[in-house]
Structures are given as structure tokens and as C-alpha cells.
Image: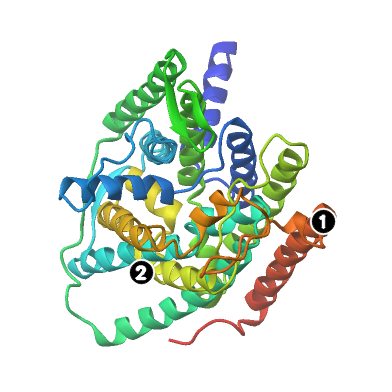
């Protein structure tokens, strides 16, 4: 075999690994943790709720409910993250030959409206979706991540019970599903064009001398170029690994499969180690990503969000990357996710300041802070735990979860009967 043939063969193997194969969930989780630390060091921790809430606010503004225009979708860091995440997932789906227009049965379309709305409500009550309320919450050493963790477990179990009831009692709307395939060669062209669009967008941000308003005040617009690339890389990684956190809470009680739960636990541990260094050394403010829902608000938010996510067939991030691969049900879920978040935020974060976030800012962001009605703002290293104790607590919690789901996989004791 000639040297050129060998090189061509190895290039095809590499393309298959990077663009076509489903990635191992543990490898995917490690890559996600790494990218999450990098984007936190670059500008901000990421999530899905900030994006969809901005889009929901624009819908409310368009129909006249909101009087003031929300932040420009291309200048709002949360929206840029969401757009880039979907774009990265689209690139992955197209280059891997996974993109198709998948139209669900009629019942699933109706459920998409309800599911998205519940996800929006739960995300605001819980301080974020599965990422902002749980994954990056624990990663940023905020106690509210534990509240949502408890709620996600309960909500997933309740949603499974409902799903089994639905299977036995509701027969309407089972028809109408179909898939519209896109030619493989055209998918590759679309994937390359989308990748070029992401790169061009990043260069456009980097070459600007303008500023945008974000959580750090006025920042150079070039910052969003890095945010765009990193969020696109996250979307690509999630889609390639088909990594959906809600599976980690659903599958142990549905099939007993615990691979995703263990992968999420591993990823949380890796994330915590990275962001703890950033916060301890002063690169990231301790108050970053703190929410005042360490209490009943975080638990209730987790329950509602998980219930909606199981009905939707995807969590906050799972919904976005599935949008990128053409799943029409999630195209319905995401706008209602945004509307649910936007409307709930008007109530929770409006004049009543139920969470207490306005009072927290006005007080100078002290930690802990207990004046909200949904719970408290608690930065775990500023409690009796310190940084070492916080690390031990989160590691111990993830190890306990790992052991619980592994035990359940062997014994099937936690698997729900249909």
C-alpha cells in the first residue's frame, strides 16, 4: 500500500472517530467538563436557560406583553451560547449523517407544549436547567445544586409513573410520525457551511471594537467570539456523545442502565476541580453563578423541570442539541421552554423579588444570604466546610450516587414496574 493510500485510510478513520462514531459517555463527560472550565475562565459558566429566556422575552415583547425590548440575541451572552450550541450540534449531526426532519406523533406535539412550559417554570424556580441548576451550580460550589439534584430525582420518577399511565390509558394521537431524510452529501455541505458560519461569526466578534453589557459590566465584544466557539464545541460534543443528563436520572428507574448517571457524576467531579481552582485563585468571582434557591424552591424547581424534561425527551441541553439534529418535537419544546422561563421570571424576579436576587445585589452580594423566599444564597466554601470540605462533600455525593445507581443496575431494586 502506498504512503498516500495509508494517509487516506488514516484520515477516513479519524473522520469516522471525530464525526460519525457515537462517543463514549465517560469521554464525553470529561470533554464537557474541560470545555465548561475553559468557558468559565474565558467569560462565564454556561447553561440553556439564559438563551431560551432571552428568546422567550423577545416573543413576549413581540406580542406586547413586555414593554421594553430585551437584549439583542447576538449581544446577549446567554443567547449567543444557545445559538452556538445548536450550531455546533447541527455541524455534528450533518457531518455524521444524523440530520433529518423527524416529525413526532400528534400526541407528542401536544406534550411538547406542556413539557417545554414546565421546563421553563422549573428552571426559574430551580436557579437554572439541569446545567445551571445542577451541573454548573455544583461546579461553581453553590449549594443550590444539591437542592435541584434532589428535585431532579423525584421529578424523573414521577414523570416515569405518568409515562407508564399514559401508555396504558391514552391511545389518541399515536399516528402522524414520519422522517424526512436529507441526502448524506448535502448534509456534509450543510455541516461545512455551518462550521464556516461559526468561524466567521467568531472572527466578526473578535474584530469589533464595540462593547456589550453582561454580568461583568461593559466587556469587549471580542469576548463573545470565544464564547461562540466554546459553546459550539459543547454543542458538537453533546450531540456526538448523545449526552443527555436527564437520562442519568430517568434510566436507572426505567431500565436500570446507569452509564449516563455515572458519566454525569464523573463530569461533575472533573468540573468542580477545575472551577474550584479558578475561584480559589481569584480568576472567577465567588458570587458567580450563585442563586438563592438552596431550599424548597430548588427542590420544587427540579421536580417540575425533570417532569417536563422526561415528557420532552430531552433536558435543557438535550433539547438544544436535538433541535440541531432536526427533531421537530424539540423545535416545539424550546420556544415554550423560553416562554415558560420568561413568564415565570417576570413573577419571581419582578417587583416582588421572590428569590431575593435584587436584595442580594443591593446588599453587596454577601454570602450566605437568606432574605429570599425560595431559599438561600450559599457558597459552600464560605461555610464551615471551607474549600477542602466542599470538595469532599461534592465528591462524596457523586460517589454515593455512583454507588446507588450501580447497585440498582445489579439488583433492579429501583426500577419502576409498568
Q: Is residue 115 left or right of residue 129?
A: left
Residue occupying the point 42% across, 47% down: 50
- Binning the other alpha carbons within 10 Å of mark 1 as few (below 14), some (14 to 19) or many (20 upward) gives few
Residue occupying the point 34% across, 37% down: 71
Circle nearer the viewer, 2 or 1: 1
Residue 81 numbered mark, or none: none
Residue placed most toward the observer, 417 or 266: 266
Mark 2 near mark 1, Cβ–Cβ under 8 Å? no
Displayed quadrant of residue 189: top left
Q: In this view, does 372 lie to the left or right of 57?
A: right
What's the image's color scheme?
rainbow
180, above or below 408, in the image? above
Residue occupying the point 38% across, 30% down: 75
Q: How far apart are marks 2 and 1 (CA)?
A: 39 Å
Residue 400 x %, y %: 73, 70
Residue placed most toward the observer, 38 or 56: 56
Q: Label 1: which residue? A: 386
Residue 311 numbered mark, or none: 2
198, above or below 142, in the image? above
Q: Element under label 2?
A: helix
Q: Do we see residue 10 in this rendering? A: yes
300, above or below 62, in the image? below
Amino acid at each position: 500500500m502506498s504512503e498516500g493510500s495509508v494517509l487516506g485510510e488514516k484520515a477516513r478513520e479519524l473522520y469516522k472517530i471525530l464525526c460519525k462514531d457515537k462517543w463514549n459517555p465517560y469521554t464525553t463527560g470529561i470533554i464537557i467538563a474541560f470545555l465548561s472550565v475553559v468557558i468559565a475562565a474565558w467569560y462565564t459558566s454556561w447553561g440553556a436557560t439564559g438563551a431560551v429566556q432571552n428568546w422567550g422575552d423577545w416573543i413576549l415583547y413581540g406580542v406586547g406583553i413586555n414593554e421594553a425590548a430585551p437584549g439583542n440575541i447576538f449581544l446577549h451572552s446567554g443567547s449567543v451560547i444557545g445559538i452556538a450550541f445548536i450550531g455546533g450540534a447541527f455541524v455534528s449531526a450533518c457531518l455524521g449523517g444524523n440530520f433529518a426532519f423527524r416529525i413526532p406523533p400528534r400526541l407528542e406535539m401536544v406534550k411538547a407544549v406542556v413539557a417545554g412550559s414546565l421546563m421553563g417554570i422549573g428552571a426559574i424556580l430551580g436557579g437554572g436547567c439541569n446545567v445551571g441548576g445542577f451541573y454548573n451550580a455544583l461546579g461553581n460550589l453553590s449549594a443550590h445544586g444539591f437542592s435541584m439534584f434532589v428535585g431532579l430525582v423525584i421529578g424523573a420518577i414521577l414523570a416515569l409513573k405518568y409515562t407508564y399511565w399514559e401508555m396504558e390509558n391514552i391511545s389518541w394521537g399515536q399516528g402522524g410520525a414520519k422522517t424526512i431524510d436529507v441526502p448524506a452529501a448535502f448534509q456534509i455541505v450543510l455541516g461545512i457551511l455551518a462550521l464556516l458560519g461559526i468561524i466567521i461569526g467568531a472572527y466578526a466578534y473578535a474584530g469589533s471594537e464595540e462593547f456589550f453589557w453582561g454580568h461583568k459590566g461593559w466587556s469587549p465584544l471580542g469576548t463573545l467570539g470565544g464564547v461562540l466557539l466554546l459553546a459550539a464545541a459543547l454543542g458538537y460534543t453533546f450531540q456526538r456523545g448523545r449526552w443527555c443528563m436527564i437520562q442519568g436520572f430517568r434510566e436507572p428507574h426505567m431500565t436500570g442502565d446507569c452509564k449516563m448517571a455515572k458519566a454525569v457524576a464523573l463530569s461533575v467531579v472533573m468540573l468542580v476541580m477545575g472551577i474550584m481552582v479558578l475561584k480559589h485563585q481569584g480568576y472567577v468571582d465567588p458570587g458567580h453563578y450563585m442563586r438563592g434557591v438552596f431550599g424548597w424552591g430548588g427542590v420544587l424547581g427540579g421536580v417540575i423541570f425533570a417532569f417536563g424534561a422526561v415528557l420532552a425527551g430531552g433536558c435543557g441541553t438535550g433539547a438544544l442539541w436535538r433541535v440541531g439534529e432536526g427533531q421537530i418535537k424539540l423545535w416545539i419544546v424550546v420556544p415554550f421552554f423560553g416562554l415558560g422561563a420568561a413568564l415565570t421570571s417576570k413573577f419571581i424576579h419582578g417587583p416582588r423579588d421572590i428569590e431575593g436576587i435584587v436584595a442580594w445585589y443591593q446588599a453587596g452580594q454577601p454570602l450566605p444570604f437568606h432574605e429570599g423566599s425560595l431559599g438561600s444564597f450559599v457558597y459552600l466554601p464560605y461555610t464551615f466546610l471551607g474549600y477542602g470540605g466542599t470538595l469532599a462533600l461534592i465528591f462524596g455525593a457523586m460517589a454515593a450516587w455512583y454507588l446507588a445507581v450501580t447497585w440498582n443496575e445489579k439488583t433492579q431494586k429501583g426500577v419502576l414496574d409498568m
